[in-house]
Amino acid sequence: MKNINPTQTDSWRKLGEHFKEIGKLQMKDLFEEDENRGADFSIHWEDFYLDYSKNRITDETRSLLLELARECKLEEAISSYFGGEVINKTEGRPVLHTALRAKEDENVTVEGENVLPEVQEVKAKIKAFSDEVIEGSRKGYTGKKFTDIVNIGIGGSDLGPVMVTESLQYYQNHLKVHYVSNVDGDHVHQAIQDLNPETTLFIIVSKSFTTQETLSNSITIRSWFNKTAPEEAVSKHFVAVSSNVEKVKEFGIASENIFPMWDWVGGRFSLWSAVGLSISLAVGYSNFEALLKGAQKMDTHFKDTDFNENIPVQLALISMWYNNFFKAESEAVIPYSQYLHRLPAYLQQAIMESNGKSVDRNGDKVDYQTGTIIWGEPGTNSQHAFFQLIHQGTKLIPADFIGFKHSLFQDKDHHDKLMANYFAQTEALLQGKPEEEVRSELEKKSMSADAIETLLPFKVFNGNKPTNSILIEKLTPESLGKLVAMYEHKIFVQGVIWNIFSYDQWGVELGKQLASKILAEIENNSVENHDSSTKNLLKFFLK
Ligand code: F6P
């Protein structure tokens, strides 16, 4: 990939000038001037309809942003990404989560070897294992069928599987799936307290198999298990997903119970691998496969579609427009589906661990903004929580509204109400409520002129708040796969243009190192040399 400083490009300079001209422009006026704006600024692809017309952009903005993508050699970067080049340079690895969902007859090579046969082998293992557990032919040590699954992992080894399992709850079978992630002992003890060791299967998921939280939780669970079950029972109840086979074996898990993963799959992009075993168990392998198929379709769309009609590319560029020119600090993701309640948390890791970088690909400090802060909650709950700030606060918060044409339980009354809110919010954010409208509303309530003037400023909405509407036919494993892959590629595009390495995460290391040093001090009850704040806190804790 070329290391181009985006701020030194012609298009960036032009975007800066363009911003001065249109920064204050009202979207309302753009809609008035062009009655086809809704259609012009939208993309209809398969069961996805992306409307990005409610953004502070014109035709010229769009062209300049596309020019920026071209100047930053996005097209070449996409070939390097899918072609298995070592684009994660600081860790010396390719980035190939796309290979996990590639069509069987494709050829994806790492160090000269096609990795797809290996991927297929692991998929077959996931299928066989899931089928046996679901139908009950694989049993626990006392011959009983499994009823509960516990996924032990953290970060990418937890957030992806838990987000998908929650999102696809409607498709779930009889197995109850639990997730234990936090090193907080209350998490693990709360999770296992009502479980029956005879009917519970544990999946330890850790790419590195060195993560403190996951190992501590696994040790705690195994000793809880062995309080009632004999040591030999471990092999029937514990499996692991990891790329560190040696460490897994040291932990006492037999080779046949290990599901491998590869260096070229980043943790936060790994739900498509055996890391998704809990998904396959929860909803069955065919649904897991449909999830992968959806992602594969989005990969093809991203790889082969002109940038102008390319969903991840357009979303990435618009988001950069706000981040780098409007100086927006954050972005909200608002799914109008309760099932997607963990999507914002999942995207926080995917986006912020990837693009939260301040050194460019040349190793120089950047002097422009990179990764956005992501947050969100499902609508309509969020409307009754933080929407006040989006509507009337001082910050510009571009938001993605994700909705579905059909609900799963097909309760028309509820779904119409939900979607009325979905449409109303983006329209309200666009239109706002001008002074004249507020005044005439208050006049109708026969308030005095003085009272009206006093209340007026508080009831005015400025509007002009940007949103993307992503409207999808129905929440299915396949459409969810497309949605997640869409955000993965948005991350990639932004990383390429910001000229940063999106696929390492050195920033999480320092805290980990310090925690192990401090743990030793806590265990020895001796506080070493720290700043006075940390020292006092530790003394207070230890007293
Ligand atoms: O927080 C850092 C991190 O390395 C994440 O990137 C990763 O998803 C998580 O820890 C868990 O890592 P592992 O799967 O190796 O236990």
Image (spheres, rainbow, N blue to C red):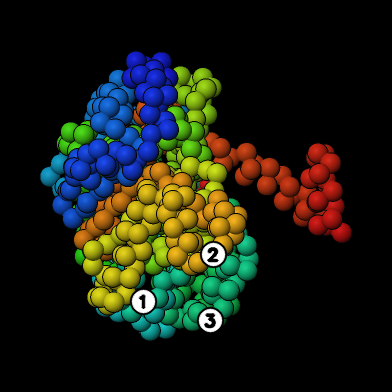
- Tags 2 and 1 touching, CB below 8 Å: no
Q: Which residue is mark 3?
A: 194
Q: Is mark 2 within 8 Å of ligand 1?
A: no
User: Relative to the observer, which residue lies in front, 482 or 322?
Assistant: 322
Residue displayed at 23% across by 45% down: 38
| Mark 2 vs 1, N-terminal side | 1
Q: Is residue 376 above or below residue 227?
A: above
In the picture, measured across the screen, residue 139 lies left or right of residue 325, that is: left
Q: Is residue 345 visible?
A: no
User: Relative to the observer, which residue lies in front, 315 or 229?
Assistant: 315
* Residue neighbourhood size for the residue with mark 2, other residues' Cα within 10 Å, grouped as few (<14), some (14–19), many (≥20): few
Q: Between marks 2 and 1, how big is the CA–CA gap?
A: 60 Å
Residue ranking furthest to the left: 105
Secondary structure under the numbered disc 1 in the rendered image? loop
The disc placed on residue 447 is 2
* Residue neighbourhood size for the residue with mark 3, other residues' Cα within 10 Å, grouped as few (<14), some (14–19), many (≥20): few
Amino acid marked by disc 3: Asp
Q: Which residue is mark 1?
A: 175
- Tags 1 and 3 touching, CB below 8 Å: no
Q: Nearer the viewer's eye, disc 2 or disc 3?
A: 2
Secondary structure under the numbered disc 2 in the rendered image? loop
| Mark 1 vs 3, N-terminal side | 1
- Tags 2 and 3 touching, CB below 8 Å: no
In the picture, measured across the screen, residue 356 lies left or right of residue 185, that is: left
- Residue 415 place in picture, x, y as percent: 29, 71
Q: Determine which quarter of the picture holds residue 479.
A: bottom left
User: Relative to the observer, which residue lies in front, 344 or 399?
Assistant: 399
| Mark 2 vs 3, N-terminal side | 3
Q: Between marks 2 and 3, how big is the CA–CA gap?
A: 60 Å
Amino acid marked by disc 1: Leu
Residue displayed at 40% across by 43% down: 464
